[in-house]
Image (spheres, helix red, strand yellow):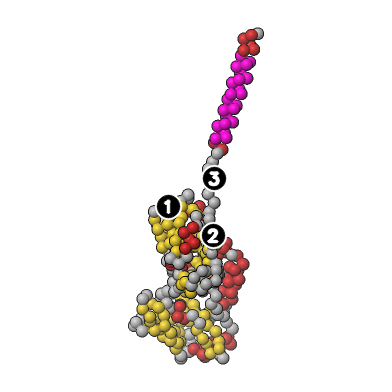
Amino acid sequence: MKKNKLLLIILIFGLFFFTGCGKEDNEKKGDTPKKESAVLSTKGLSVDGIYQDESYENEKLSLIYVFYTVDKVEKNATLFSSSLKMKINDTNEYKATVSSNNVPMFTNYAYSDFGKKVYVGDTFKMCSTIEVAKGDLEAGRNIVFSHSEIEGFKDLKLKTDDIKKKANLDEISKDLDESVYTTKKTEEDNMMKAVDAATLNMFKKSVNGYYFEFYSNVGTKISKQKLEFDAPNKFVISTSMGLSNSGTYDVKNGYVVLNYKTGMSVKIKYKFENNDVSLLNAESVFSTYTDYDPLKK
């Protein structure tokens, strides 16, 4: 009987001891480090979205979109989309570039390497695109931004985990601001609708047999461009640098679309003024620089 009592005491003590130890071990295992919150805004600056475009076709590089708002700037400045730099894990630094293939046209964010002038008190929205090595976008890596004109970027804190992955630029724009995306996409669709016969005839009567002259930036040079239209729907574009190309044109509700023989096409906005056609953005269309300004009509 004494042995049984002694055995019972040992069992109870052992159960208490191991249960207590297990509880302490579980508490230790549960003590995971807290994730540091991202800092996406500072005085006068907020990053409204940072995205990876998964449709970008490049074996080594991914394309990152950074959308930001500069609020009530404290000094006059000229802002370029290409002025933003992104450094990962304090090792590799990537500089923003601007391409006509990456224009966020269904957003309210300017995208330009012409430069946008902002003045004291202005609020301005801008987009930058950065090519980053795919290996540098692994989870948990630190991101540091810098900008030649916007000091607030250096105070932001974020990691590669904070980059949203989206299928394409349309999905990025929709996630950023769906109402703006819907409005601008609808406007674009309307501008690309075919015109009626009367409008088509009025357009052809205004341009066929005539030409438009304008100047565009081609690399570091200014080139004089001459765009000629001819019946029934032909065009020839030539430059002061001795280059020329040709093809046919289609008239849409808000664009004249130039279809080159090479298969490429470009869209130029137009409007009627006293039954005559005015081309609205030919200079930027034929420029090697990109200048998307959501405020321009």
Percent x, y of residue 5: 64, 12
Give the distance between the C-alpha atoms of the residues marked 3 and 1, in whole angstroms.
Answer: 19 Å
Percent x, y of residue 80: 45, 70
Marks 1 and 2 in Cβ contact (< 8 Å): no
Q: Quadrant of the N terminus?
A: top right
Give the distance between the C-alpha atoms of the residues marked 3 and 2, in whole angstroms.
Answer: 21 Å
Amino acid at the residue labelled 1: Asn
| Left or right: 198 in relation to 240 | right
Q: Secondary structure at mark 1?
A: loop
Please tell me which residue is depicted at 42% across the width and 77% down the height of the picture.
Answer: 287
Please tell me which residue is depicted at 62% across the width and 9% down the height of the picture.
Answer: 3
Pointer 2 residue: 41
Work out whether mark 1 precedes mark 2 in sequence or the reverse, and give the earlier one.
2
Percent x, y of residue 199: 57, 86
**What is the chief secondary structure element of the magenta stretch?**
helix
Amino acid at the residue labelled 2: Ser
Q: Is residue 28 above or below residue 72?
A: above
Work out whether mark 3 precedes mark 1 in sequence or the reverse, and give the earlier one.
3
In reply to whether residue 269 is colored magenta, the answer given is no
Work out whether mark 3 precedes mark 2 in sequence or the reverse, and give the earlier one.
3
Mark 3 is surrounded, within 10 Å at the Cα level, by few (under 14), some (14 to 19) or many (20 or more) other residues, namely few
Pointer 1 residue: 89
Determine which of the numbered discs, if any, sits on residue 34 in the image: 3
As rendered, which of 291 and 259 lies closer to the eye? 291
Q: How many marks?
A: 3
Q: Is residue 280 above or below residue 169?
A: below
Question: Start and end of the magenta stretch?
Answer: 7-28
Using the rendered image of the protein, determine whether residue 106 is visible from the camera's viewpoint.
no
Q: Secondary structure at mark 3?
A: loop
Marks 3 and 1 in Cβ contact (< 8 Å): no
